[in-house]
Amino acid sequence: MTTLTIKPIEFLPTSFRQRPPTKLVGREEDRETYLWYITEDEYLRLCKLFRRDFQETGLGGTKVLGQPSPCRGCGKYAEFIDWVWTALSREVHSREFMFKALVEHRQGVEVKHDVYCSQCGLLTLSAGDDREGGKPDIYQAGPLDRSTYTSSHGAEGEKTERPRKAGASEPVTWGKWWLDNSGKCLVSAYGEKVPE
């Protein structure tokens, strides 16, 4: 008899209930594209999730189609961390793989995936089809069945060349996180240290 091992799910509680600060950056697929800024509260949760300082990625926000909306279960607004948490919880990618991809700026505008709330586990954004299951919560969703996906790394055994960032540079770190929870920027120029 085979025993199925179910990986425990770790939720990321937060008392932050404001909509994350955003900036309209254009249109894609006839929808408005926004930069969702990462607040200090989200930054601290990302550090916990990745088990390292998220500032090493140099990422201060992420491009998403549409505005953040509140979770119908707990009221937390959708944030970048929900994509990361969902991918880890559904065993799509490892922490190391995602962190490296972020450092190498291999993150495009949101792709259509089922995304679950990192605080309560309810489905907050749907892929819009049954490809990812569309289950109402993370427990029912379980690990993602990747057999329906085509690899983005070329044919089996072949590795496609990815564009590299021009010139090696050190990641920008701000000391303290550069954006407070109200959306106020604490630096006047990219790369400056936040005053203590």
Image: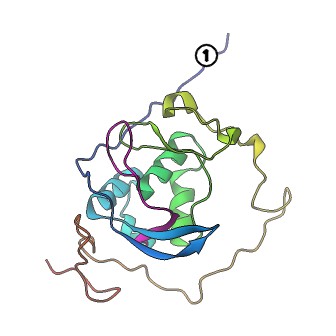
For label 1, the residue is: 3
Which residue is drawn at the image coordinates 57% and 45% (left, top)?
Answer: 126
Render colour scheme: rainbow
The residue positioned farthest toward the left in the image shown:
196
Q: Residue 25 in the image: state x and y as whole percent.
A: 49, 77
As for residue 63 lying within the magenta part, the answer is: yes
Magenta stretch, overall SS:
loop
Which residue is drawn at the image coordinates 53% and 57% (left, top)?
Answer: 96
Amino acid identity at mark 1 = Thr
Q: Residue 166 in the image: state x and y as whole percent.
A: 59, 88
Left or right of residue 13: residue 112: right
As for residue 89 lying within the magenta part, the answer is: no
Instruction: Name the quadrant of the C terminus.
Output: bottom left
Which residue is drawn at the image coordinates 35% and 41% (left, top)?
Answer: 119
Q: Nearer the viewer, residue 48 or 128?
A: 128
72 is higher (above) or lower (below) than 93: above
Q: Is residue 136 visible?
A: yes
Q: Residue 101 in the image: state x and y as whole percent.
A: 57, 65
Range of the magenta residues?
59-78
Kindly indicate the quadrant of the structure image that contains residue 111.
Answer: bottom right
Kindly indicate the quadrant of the structure image that contains residue 171.
Answer: bottom left
Kindly indicate the quadrant of the structure image that contains residue 110.
Answer: bottom right
Which residue is drawn at the image coordinates 38% and 80% (left, top)?
Answer: 172
